[in-house]
Amino acid sequence: MRLLHPPSPGRRTALTDEVHDVLAPSGEDGDDGATAPQLVAAARSLATGLLGPAAEATDQAGIVPAGHLRALAESGLCGLFCPPAAPLAATREIFEILAGACGVTFFVWVQHHAPVRMLAGSPNEALRRRHLDDLCTGRVLGGVAFAYLRRPGSPAVVARRRAGGYVVDGEAPWVTSWGLAGLYSVAARLGDDVVYFLVEAAPSEALQPSDPLALAAMGASSTVRLSFDGLFVPDDDVLTVMPLDEWRARDTVATAQPNPAAFGITATCIRLLADAGHPSTGLSGELDECRKRSYALADARRTDAAHLAAQVEARAQSLELAVRAATALVVATGGRGMSSGHPAQRLLREAAFFTIQAQTPELRRATLAQLGLTS
């Protein structure tokens, strides 16, 4: 099958509703029907009945249990962004719930939504018909590789046009869910453009993963370096081609959005502090205020520089709050909090992880400023 209008060096297309940082959903609200509260209830049930109780074991495991992801799929939580998308408020709440229950399961699951959204908005109708239903039902887990586009210097992954498609070379330094995801959306530099394509997670001479990286947090995410050595991508598998400047403008907006994971971690720390006899009304008030401000800024849907700067500041505030809440939990717990079987140390590592996830120079400066430092 072919695109009706295959991309070529002179033709550029754009996704209708692309979101790079799916931790910060920014699309239009879908129909607020009965499914929204059902999805939130399903997330709470999984968080309290499966993910939370197993979080320490999952954190120490070699890879996120397939049963966790199967349970998320069976609850309909792999289709949040399938048309019509779940309401934004419900999606944020679900993200908070799952991130607060088990950070690494959340991190693997949340990246699934990037290829779903990209595919749903792609002009490649044949590609949507081929893969969207499997992704929406969770029969296939999705993954993503693109963050290296933010890095200065020579492009990490490049594409060149060849008859009928593109040839891709380079190395993606951070690709999560290898061995779990079956389909990845991948970005490559194409001169002054960016080409996004889908590729199946099947090692070959042209597609080689490293061993899983040894990480201080999210170790069970099975994150690898992925090498491309002359990988041929047919036009059939191309999601879109867009100007690099357009990608950068979109990414600036996406990475300024609030991070629901930070709110979920903070809420869990506050709950565990209370359970241990250390009620923290101050932290609770900060969480409520930070969440309210962050989501209000995002919902204004403005992209002027001053507004984006305010959003980056709010995001940095939420990240610092999560680290501070997790630190308070460690301190209140004492030595037990450093054992691998206690959630305090895990939550602190997860909170630290999200301070660098989707990090930009602007967010780094804002986060350091929250810590009383300057870069």
Image (tube, rainbow, N blue to C red):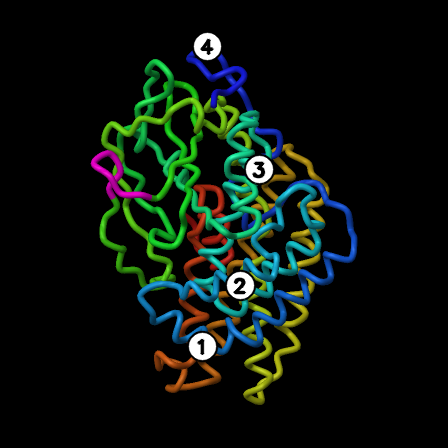
According to the image, label 3 marks what residue?
253
Q: Is residue 97 magenta?
A: no
Query: Looking at this rendering, what residue extends furthest in the top direction?
Result: 10
Q: Residues within 10 Å of mark 1 (few under 14, many from 20)?
A: many
Q: Which mark is residue 99?
A: 2
Q: Position of residue 114 (x, y in %)?
A: 51, 43
Spatial distance from mark 2 to mark 1, Cα to Cα?
A: 14 Å
Specify start and end residues of the magenta stretch as a single range: 202-208
Q: Nearer the viewer, mark 3 or mark 4?
A: 4
- First-in-chain label (3 vs 1): 3
Q: Nearer the viewer, mark 3 or mark 2?
A: 2
Label 3's element? helix
Residue 247's place in the image compared with 368, above or below, is above
According to the image, label 4 marks what residue?
10
Indicate left or right for 25 with 152 as reference: right
The amino acid marked with disc number 2 is: Ala
Spatial distance from mark 3 to mark 2, Cα to Cα?
A: 22 Å
- First-in-chain label (3 vs 4): 4
Indicate left or right for 44 with 359 as reference: right
According to the image, label 1 marks what residue?
344
Label 1's element? helix
The amino acid marked with disc number 4 is: Gly
Spatial distance from mark 2 to mark 4, Cα to Cα?
A: 42 Å
